[in-house]
Image: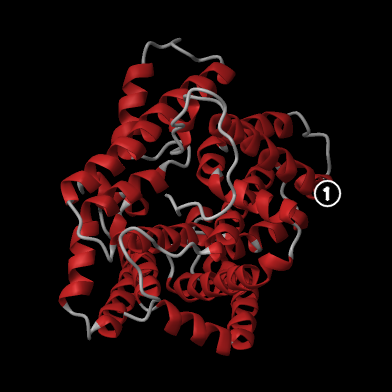
Amino acid sequence: MDTAKRTNKQRPYLYEVDLMRIIFISGVLLNHVTTAFSNAMPASISKTVLQATHLSLHFTRMGFMFMTGLVLFLNYYDKENSWLAFWKKRYSSVGFSYIAWNILLLLFTEGVAGTLFSKGNFFNELVDALIHGNHFYLYYVYVTSQLYLLFPLLVKLFKRFPKEHNIILLISFMLQLSLLFLIKYELPVVDTSNWWFIFRSYGMNFFVYQIYFTMGAYTVIHYQQITSRIKKYQKWIGSLAVLLAIGTVGLYYFNRDILKLSAAKTMSIHQPYMLFYAISMVATVFLIGLHYAKVRNKMAEQVTAKINLIAKVSFGLYLAQTIPLTILKMILSRLTFLPAWGFILLVPIGYLFVWLISFGIAYFCYKVPPFGRLIGRPQKRRYLVKEVFVHDKVNQ
């Protein structure tokens, strides 16, 4: 193993992970905010520009999947694990958050819309949301739950073939690329109406993201080798990420004008091109995180403390985002008198609004017992949590 020697009692704290979490969650929120603005804008050049550049933000979902694989392998790869205990711990934590947020957000959105219990179908909608994971951006939790189930097999695979890790990664990549070609060019002409939901709605399927989990696992196992390589080629990686980001604009017009795809298919993340773009962006964000880890000791303690705090509650920001996004959409629906360029000018304000409200909700949960369970940060004491910013374990 290329990583520094670790024991079950002591694992390295990867400060780079803190900043990576913040970048990815901030990107997710920006993605959803710009979608809200685009949907509210009248047809115009400004709207087309916003839509054409939207694909460049679609690396964040893959970044979260990469981070999940990385953190899980960091915590469990070198341990003698009881997988029953692992499943109990993970599913009790994520299961509570998943069920609770589905209930809370359904109550909130229907309450805002004035349809709460009006048709007597709240329970049916809740069951549908829980079964399919397609409400309130909770697909990530839904997919992660599938990863937890398969995680012991992934660990066993890497341990069973210790000298074939490069081959495992290559097979994973080729499988992902083949799957994306199938999804984009073959699946649209296939009748999937009778398929099982998890295959019909492939965005909820673990295997559509498997390369990013595998990359996270590979990165942890060969950490020193990977970090040395990306540092060595950092200029090339950064340049490639910029070029591929610009290329997403061309991809948009290719999909829309040449392939004549629908708006949803045009901006879908499930395209072969997006695999290369997402990997380049994950590597670039990783480089930024490594730079932060290198210089953090020279930074003001207040700054590093805030970064640590935001990283801790980043999952909470993700879970809570539906609340400010719903409010934002209501506000935008009342601004129909604005020209398209007026909406563009408001994007930074809308983004700041959604980010701060999401953080405020997550921070409240983090500080006030027993709401920490909602964001996967259960408090061990009944009184307010006291902040600790040094050598904290990396948690999901």
Tell me if 162 is positioned left or right of 238 in this view. Answer: left
Tell me if 159 is positioned left or right of 346 in this view. Answer: left
Residue 332 in the image, given as x and y percentages of width and height: 72, 34
Q: Quadrant of residue 220?
A: bottom left
Q: Residue at x 55, y 56 (%)?
A: 21
Residue closest to the eye, 336 or 369: 369
Q: Residue at x 69, y 44 (%)?
A: 37
Residue 155 in the image, given as x and y percentages of width and height: 23, 65
Residue 129 in the image, given as x and y percentages of width and height: 36, 32
Residue at which label 1 appears:
345
Residue closest to the eye, 297 or 289: 297
User: Can residue 391 be seen?
Assistant: yes
User: Can residue 193 be seen?
Assistant: no
Q: Is residue 4 above or below residue 11?
A: below
Residue closest to the eye, 352 or 257: 352
Tell me if 42 is positioned left or right of 375 in this view. Answer: right
Q: In the structure shown, which secondary structural element does the residue marked by tag 1 occupy? A: helix
Q: Is residue 281 above or below residue 381?
A: below
Q: Quadrant of residue 18?
A: bottom right
Q: Is residue 78 above or below residue 93?
A: below
Tell me if 147 is positioned left or right of 356 in this view. Answer: left
Residue closest to the eye, 132 or 314: 314
Please rate how many residues cluster around mark 1, counting C-alpha atoms within 10 Å: few if below 14, some from 14 to 19, many from 20.
few
Kind of residue at disc 1: Leu
Residue 350 in the image, given as x and y percentages of width and height: 74, 41
Q: Quadrant of the N terminus?
A: bottom left
**Number of numbered callouts drawn:** 1
